[in-house]
Amino acid sequence: MAKKSYRIGVDLGTANILVYITGSGVVYNEPSVVAFDNTTKECIAVGKRAFDMVGKEHKHIRIVKPLDGGVIADLDATKVYLQKVFEKLENINVDLKNSTLLLCCPSQVTHIERVALIDLAKKIGVKDAFIEEELKAGAIGAGLDIYESKGSMVVDIGGGTTDVGVLSLGDLVVSESCKVAGNYLDKEITKYVKFKYGIIIGASTAEMIKIKLGTLASELQEEKECVFAGRNLTNGLPCKMTIKQSEVREIFLKGFEVVVNTIKKVLQQTPPELASDIYQSEIMINGGGAMIDGVKEYLEEALSLKVKIAENPLTSIVEGTRLLLNNRGNYLVKPSDY
Ligand SMILES: Nc1ncnc2c1ncn2[C@@H]1O[C@H](COP(=O)(O)OP(=O)(O)OP(=O)(O)O)[C@@H](O)[C@H]1O
Ligand SMILES: [Mg+2]
């Protein structure tokens, strides 16, 4: 069968990488993890298979997270990861050389990093590549009309960063970012469990506790609990313990003070006409953190503004690439099938 050229959108996330192809939808959605053989230096797994190895690997395996804290931490690993994903695409007859690729990256990514990403796309075999801010793609994917002369605010609570931006007339007007996001909360849970219970837990266990008990609710209806296992710091042996939701809630409330301050900082820099628009509309929440229990009510209370959780917060960005690929990100041209 002859190969076909496509328009391809990629959400390069710290926690998850997603790929969209025109006509087929989201064709790839897996964790941002690569596993290498330490001796041969060859890639042995990417995505879910590599994620399952995290914390369980032996000396012959090296696990790498290509993105960290919203930036590309390891360009080689990012290249290997995308190469593996695109090999899969070629198997389904995607002609990469003649396809258009849109890579979504955090708004704080520097010019040099953008050039490196375009370079990377070329190395993978895609000649026609361009970059867009993920906040913009996420806002479109969540259903906001960013091409209007009207201000809208979007907050993306991801794995590595929480990104906050105000958009109008097709582009970002103000944006800020902070490190309080999924990974930060996992690390705070790990620290808490170590000091409170003297137990060392792995990253997957911390994430499991976060997802099961994480909440920003002002009151807890019932005290939920979660049993977890780890290694006892005193005798080095495996053990189990129970953690309460109220303990996890304290960690969340402390972390989210930073998120609220970041949103306030963006609001303070927002021109008054756009601030007035935001006051009359809703702040859109994207990213995995949008699924935290009570986040909508918590932010509404903290900001005295209306908040809306995106319908599909984990896929908004990659869904938004569908439209941005139609106008090649030109802010003057509203994509035709908006
Ligand atoms: N129900 C949930 N409650 C709390 N956190 C969750 C939930 N579901 C997913 N997460 C967290 O959301 C994060 C992943 O979100 P997302 O896929 O938006 O991140 P990302 O786009 O890869 O990261 P970034 O945008 O920072 O580069 C992970 O830290 C994950 O643990
Ligand atoms: Mg993201």
Image: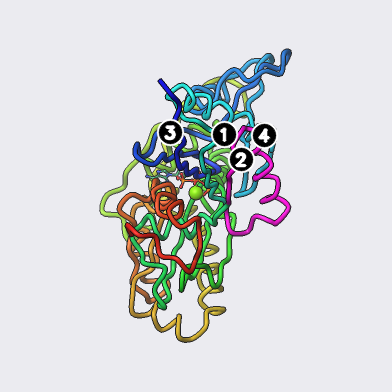
Q: Residue at x 45, y 81 (%)?
A: 275
Q: Look at label 4 and name its amino acid.
A: Lys
| Label located before the other in sequence (2 or 1) | 1
Mark 2 to mark 1 CA distance (whole Å): 6 Å
Can you tell which of label 2 and label 4 is closer to the viewer?
2
Q: Is residue 117 above or below residue 297?
A: above
Mark 1, residue position: 97
Q: Are marks 2 and 1 in contact (CB under 8 Å)?
A: yes
Queried on whether the Cβ of the residue with tag 4 lies below 8 angstroms from ligand 1, the answer reads no
> Disc 4 on helix, strand or loop?
helix
Can you tell which of label 4 and label 1 is closer to the viewer?
1
> Disc 3 on helix, strand or loop?
strand
Mark 3, residue position: 28
Q: Which one is in front, 230 or 241?
A: 230
- The magenta span reads 106-130
Q: Look at label 2 and name its amino acid.
A: Lys
Q: Look at label 1 and name its amino acid.
A: Lys
Say which mark, if any, is on residue 123. Answer: 4
Mark 2, residue position: 127
Indicate the position of residue 239 as horizontal and vertical percent values.
50, 24
| Label located before the other in sequence (4 or 3) | 3
Q: Look at label 3 and name its amino acid.
A: Tyr
